[in-house]
Amino acid sequence: MNSMEKKSALILSFIAGAAAGAVVGYLLASGKGEEMLADVKEAAGKFKDEFDKQIDNGKEILEEIKNMSEEQA
């Protein structure tokens, strides 16, 4: 990564951080923000639960593949 790319990445990171901070500030300052934040937390929890289920399913599939390959060996 050259100097110009590093500067661009730094500026982009700063802008993204500032935007995220502004959104969080807005959500926390407004009355609806608390409700929206609760909705986001709930959705994030559901996403995490589903993600964990998919990870477990993937582990089971990998275990089955491992067992099948051991049986064939």
Image: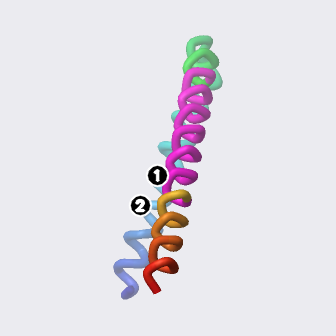
* Residue type, label 1: Ala
Q: Which residue range is magenta in the image?
A: 38-59
Which residue in the structure is indicated by mark 2? 12
For residue 44, which quarter of the picture? Answer: top right
**Residue at the (40%, 85%) spot, across then down:** 3
* Most foreground residue, 47 or 57: 57
Left or right relative to 70: residue 2? left
**Residue at the (61%, 29%) spot, across then down:** 41
**Residue at the (58%, 41%) spot, across then down:** 48
Left or right relative to 70: residue 29? right
58 up-or-down from 71: above or below? above
Assess whether mark 1 and mark 2 are in contact (beta carbons under 8 angstroms): yes
Helix, strand or loop at mark 2: helix
Q: Position of residue 53 (x, y in %)?
A: 55, 44
What is the magenta segment's predominant secondary structure? Answer: helix
For residue 35, which quarter of the picture? Answer: top right
Helix, strand or loop at mark 1: helix
Residue 49 forms part of the magenta stretch:
yes
* Residue type, label 2: Leu
Which residue in the structure is indicated by mark 1? 16
Q: Number of labelled discs?
A: 2
* Most foreground residue, 34 or 53: 53
**Residue at the (54%, 53%) spot, across then down:** 55
